Amino acid sequence: MTTAVVISAAPDRAALHRWTPWAVLVGGVIVLQLAFASAATFPAGLDETFASPIDDSGAWMRSNRLTHPLFTGFFTPISDFVEWVISTIADFLLWAPWFVVIAIAAALPLYYKRWREAAVVVLALAYTGLIGLWDDTMMTFALMTTSVLLAVVIGIPLGVWGAFNPRVEQVMRPILDAMQTIPAFVYFLPLLMLLSIGNVPAAVATVIYALPPVVRLTTLGIKQVPAEAVEASAMFGASRLQTLFKVQLPMAIKTIVAGLSQTVMMALGIVVLAQLVGANGLGSPIMESLNQRRVGRGLAAGFAIVAIALVLDRIFRSVAQRDPMRRLSSRETAGLVGAIVAALVVGRTLNVTTFPSTWDWTVFDPVDDGVAWVRDNLLDQTRWLSDFIVTWIYLPLRDLLTDTIAWPVLVFVTAWACWRVRGPGLAAFSAGALVTIGLMGQWDDSINTLVQVLIATALALAVAIPLGVWAGRNRRVEAVLSPVLDSFQTMPSLVYIIPVVVFFGLGVVAGVIATVVYAMVPGVRITALGIREVAEESVEASQAFGATPRQTMFGVRLPLAAPTIMAGVNQVIMMALAMVIITALVGAGGLGYEVVDSLAKSKFGLGFEAGLSIVLIAMILDRFTEACSDRLRPPTGH
């Protein structure tokens, strides 16, 4: 009798444990909604607490930049040094004959007999000259080169330090996470206060934003060097420093160069935005194309930025994949150097420095004509899609979260969801972050931005996951998609805005569609990776039990690939958040508009609040999706 009671009580206890969190959720939502139904907006109690001191600090910095020792003794020398490096590189690139610049860029691949890489370098740089963007390209190339050099000088030592000292790596990890999470444009606000406008804040912001991959992959590369190689070096009497430079760094060079390639890709994201803070280069023609809504000219300038990425990537790849047995002899090297010097002397003597004006970027005007024809003939379809997204998705969701649901309910539901996937720590952080956003007076703009990001993420995943599954199952499909995805990932994000504005006009829809195109790339790649990594034994076992291909896909492949796919969702969200500032330029509003407006009007306090709100939203979504990915991973047995 007693046994029966115990047995019957066990399921009741399990059911109570399972349903209690949901009861807490429903009860909390009802109580908070009834209690705060009349609270229309979040009480912005801390609005002036943050904004006023920062505005006062900005005014003080502008007044004392030329006299105070903090600037004259520290920030001004740093600014002058960075400006000198950029100007020196740019002046040389514009002073040297164009064919000498191309030859110098191709020299390193040629030295290691990497003929294909050398050809890519030559063709990429020649393209920028042929379309009349040589001078702008050289300015951007100088800015990119300076930023990458600074990232190398700072990032590699930090990466080595982290590899040798686990405590240092542990301290650096959250800092690097924050540096990658913060949208690049947010860095401009404090840098403008400290360094004024021009190339310097653009270069420094690029270094900060693009530094994490160098540090992380340098640490990884050093750690992956076989212990036997390090021990053998020590046995032959090498010091720790000798072992580092003669064994560990050479053996880790491929991983380090992979980090540099990622740094170049991330740095490209700031090149166009740098024009907004006074930097020279290709940002100007791209912004001009956006203002004129000329898709072809925007593509022309965008491809020029891609050309710079190809040049730097091929140079790094030549170093990483070099074969010591396959390089030019001393006589051939001397001949190559002599030919470059001779070309330099002849070119300067004859004053042949500027690329011959064969064409200009108007050669892409037929693209504009084609886009105009498509726009005029598909106007009804694009208008229908735009109206549908705004009327049936964007406005109802925004109004639901701002007007219908009380703000404490959103805070509570977010904390509850975070508590379920990770625990009280993430719940407390998320609730505190949302309350901070509200107290700064950024609640409505944050909801507006969040809704746009969620819509763009959902649409991007609706495209990315099926494509990723298809590519993961079919190598031929992956081979076809790979160059397309490479182009999408390399093209500056602002370029996507131009055709979207032509088809959909200014507003939320243009921002959402451009974000979908930009953000879906990692979703496709990571989904394909997750599908490919599913163990064949699991698939064969499913087939042995008579499962159909559809059942195997939904019952085996997708569940086992779910953790990896969730990591792809995380990256899609981060890419969508990175577009917040870009979409603000075409009327999407939200926090991005506040940041851009604060920059234009020197309202650094408002910009700080909006930028901090973007960062807090990014951190909540990043940690939540990361926790979901961890929960989906199968337990590891021993």
Image (spheres, grey):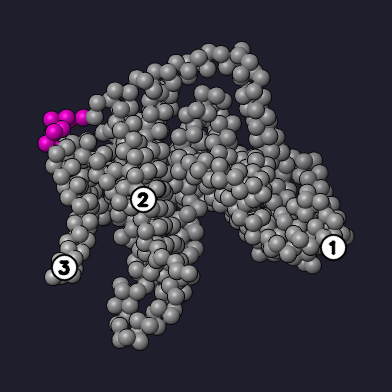
Q: Are marks 2 and 3 in contact (CB under 8 Å)?
A: no
Residue at 37% x, 72% y is: 557
Q: Magenta residues, as a range?
A: 33-41
Give x and y (percent) for residue 434: 31, 36
Q: Nearer the viewer, mark 1 or mark 2?
A: 2
Report the residue marked by disc 3. 2
Tag 3 or tag 1, which sits nearer the N-term? Answer: 3
Please tell me how crowded label 2 is: few (under 14), some (14-19), or many (20+) other residues with Cα within 10 Å: some
As drawn, the label of residue 329 is 1
Give x and y (percent) for residue 248: 72, 56
- Kind of residue at badge 3: Thr
Give x and y (percent) for residue 322: 72, 62
* SS state under label 1: loop
Q: Magenta-highlighted stretch: main secondary structure?
A: loop
Give the spatial CA distance, label 1 vs label 2.
59 Å
Tag 3 or tag 2, which sits nearer the N-term? Answer: 3
- Kind of residue at badge 1: Ser
Residue at 55% x, 42% y is: 171
Quick one: 352 or 297, which is closer to the camera? Answer: 297
Give x and y (percent) for residue 206: 55, 39
Horizontal relation, residue 70 to residue 114: left or right = left
Report the residue marked by disc 2. 422
- Kind of residue at badge 2: Arg
Q: Quadrant of residue 395?
A: top left
Would you say residue 130 is visible in this rendering?
no
Quarter placement of the N terminus: bottom left
